[in-house]
Amino acid sequence: VCSSDLDARGTVVQVLSIADDVIALKRAQSEAEAARRLLETVMDAAPASIQVKDLDLRILWANRTYRRDVSTDAVIGRRSSEVSRFPEFAARSEAADREAIATGREVQIEERLPAVGGLPERHLLVTKIPIRDAGGAVVQVLTVANNVIALKRAQAEAEDARRRLEAIMNAAPIVIQVKDLDLRIRWANRTYRDYAGGQDVIGRTSREIFSRHPALAAQSEAADREAIATGQEVRFEQH
């Protein structure tokens, strides 16, 4: 920085020069910019839909997945309700934004979206995360939406398989139970429940259920403990 001093006649009589080494500042700015570009590259490559909104719910930044989902790159400064192909979902999403801003807590919603415009059917798990400034005030809200339809399908298939297996075991003319390590029953088939006189058996031990036959219950529980301790199959007979 240079500054000139003038005398009464306007003639330059001296020049003041001030030089400051800003290389550290420039280096810090360069490193911050490199970090920003790296973060943006990572988020652009993410399969999740990601956006950052201000307190008016206008989009400040959105990754490639979000822009693809709404079929436009022109999202900055606009609200989800203005660009989404699913108005009802956008309304629910913005309501979750407001809740996250108002409470300062993470908010989750789920939404199933039909196939549209070349995009497959999706089941979105949407997380709203409030972003705070140095003073702790909420200044923005981050949205991360993951397509969990494969997980939901796997869970549905597992539940269907569980129901089929339970139906088979309930139809079996043999006594079947599942116990925890405290020997309390977690599941029992219909034959076992009938054998127990139709009483409620869940959460109870054999000794409690068959209190009139303590010796038989004790033999069964001794075999349970042996199977737990050895990790091997145990067989015994009761008459």
Image: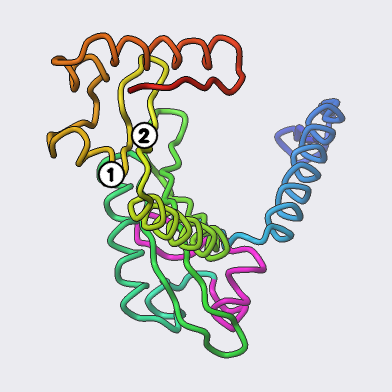
* Secondary structure state at the residue bearing disc 2: strand
Q: Is residue 134 magenta?
A: no
* Front residue of this view, candidates 12 and 64: 64
Q: Which residue is mark 1?
A: 191
User: Where is residue 95 shown, x and y percent of the image?
Assistant: 28, 61
Q: Which residue is mark 2?
A: 177
Tell me the CA gap for discs 2 and 1. 10 Å
Name, please, the residue furthest toward the bottom. 117
User: Where is residue 91 shown, x and y percent of the image?
Assistant: 30, 71
Q: Residue at x 62, y 78 (%)?
A: 73
Mark 2 or mark 1: name the one nearer the start of the chain. 2
Residue 213 occupies which quadrant of the picture?
A: top left
Residue 218 lies left or right of residue 213; in this view the side is right
Name, please, the residue furthest toward the front. 239
Q: Residue at x 45, y 84 (%)?
A: 85
Which kind of residue does numbered mark 1 sit on?
Thr
Q: Quadrant of the N terminus?
A: top right
Residue 147 lies left or right of residue 222; in this view the side is right
* Front residue of this view, candidates 118 and 159: 159
Q: Is residue 66 magenta?
A: yes
Which kind of residue does numbered mark 2 sit on?
Gln
Sort mark 2 into few (<14), some (14-19) or many (20+) by Cα contacts within 10 Å.
some
Residue 58 occupies which quadrant of the picture?
A: bottom left
Q: Check contact, mark 2 vs mark 1: CB within 8 A.
A: no
What's the magenta region?
53-75
Sort mark 1 into few (<14), some (14-19) or many (20+) by Cα contacts within 10 Å.
some
* Front residue of this view, candidates 160 and 116: 160
Foreground disc of the pair 2, 1: 1
Tally the numbered discs. 2
